[in-house]
Image: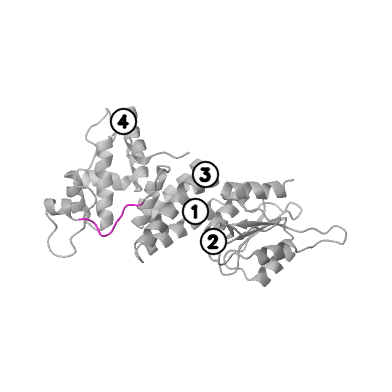
Amino acid sequence: MSVDNNDVDHQGASRGGGLTTGEVARRLGVAPTTVRSWDRRYGLGPTAHTGGRHRRWTAEDVARLERMCALTATGYPPAEAARLALDGVEPNVSPARTGPSPSRSEAGTRRSRAGTGFRLGDVRQECRGVARAALRLDTFALDGMLGAAIEEHGLVAAWTEVIMPTLQAVGRKWESSGERYVEVEHFLSWHVSCALRRYTPPAAADRARATTVLACVPGENHTLPLEVLTAALAERGLPVHMFGGALPVESLVAAVRRTGPLVVGLWAQSRTTASRPLAQHVAGIEWGVRGARRKPVVLTLGPGWAGQTVPGSPHPPGLAAAVAAVESVVLR
């Protein structure tokens, strides 16, 4: 299920007297200590107390912090960004490269060349926090939010509804901005990979060699989708052999013959790397004693296989479908 970010922020801040500092931090993609520091140093705290020692943030309070995040992301020093955020300046401004800081009137009219906004669309609220943490190259916040998303939603839902939409938004930003933001995409991808490995259960027991082999086709190095599939299958107790990117044909064939898998998943991100003859060749590999030989079911995974039908080789449209396809073969 996905929700509109603006609705969540304002409705959530109005229910129960507002949001806690921890909830605000998760929405913004910063550490709670950062929110408290901005309150203490720059006066960006909640405008009212709800009684006792508890502090609650209203929609207006959160909007000020969002402006603070956007302004610092464009390059403003925190103190100047805080002043502009308190003045209600929207984050479509550019920091002064040299000389004195821009006046308030100039700041309100100059547009940002940095273009910090990510077009996330109708997604879970966590996506915005993950995108902002990646944009700031904030290791601590990013790791925390990725881990929390996986723990709360499970691997499949976290990937489908939080991680993948954010990766796609960052990719679109990079494509539309030349070579800027490449470091953001690499940074986010690396930390997603690390999070998946942290939450991947130990290897499942070899159920009568009922293994799955996963590999990128030759020339293909986009391993992240296979990493999440590996983690999701391991989460379900299904043994997996993962071989990563650009596995040569001879090595792929050798791996299949040595492990005797029931399923082989071949990932192709691009149509230029997807190879129907390769999939058919792997699907035709036999092993076992005479009279009881078997062949693997080959899954053609990834957008590169779109339009390239391989007879007998299913093409699951997404992560959940790929997991279900493996389970249907291995567990039957």
Q: What is the CA distance from the residue labelled 2 to the residue labelled 1?
A: 22 Å
- Disc on the earlier residue, 4 or 3: 4
Along the line of sight, which residue is nearer the eye, 146 or 314?
314
- How far across and down, in percent of the image, does residue 177 sit? 34, 62
**According to the image, label 2 marks what residue?**
269
Q: What is the CA distance from the residue labelled 2 to the residue labelled 3?
A: 21 Å
- Circle 3 sits in a helix, a strand or a loop, which is it? helix
- Foreground disc of the pair 4, 1: 4
Q: Residue at x 28, y 50 (%)?
A: 69
**According to the image, label 4 marks what residue?**
14
- Disc on the earlier residue, 1 or 3: 3
- Foreground disc of the pair 4, 2: 2
Q: What is the CA distance from the residue labelled 1 to the residue labelled 3?
A: 14 Å
Image quarter hosting the C terminus: top right
**According to the image, label 3 marks what residue?**
157
- Disc on the earlier residue, 4 or 2: 4
Amino acid carrying label 3: it is Ala
Q: Classify 10 Å Cα crowding around label 1: few (below 14), some (14-19), many (20 and above).
A: some
Amino acid carrying label 4: it is Ser
Stretch of the chain drawn in magenta: 111-118
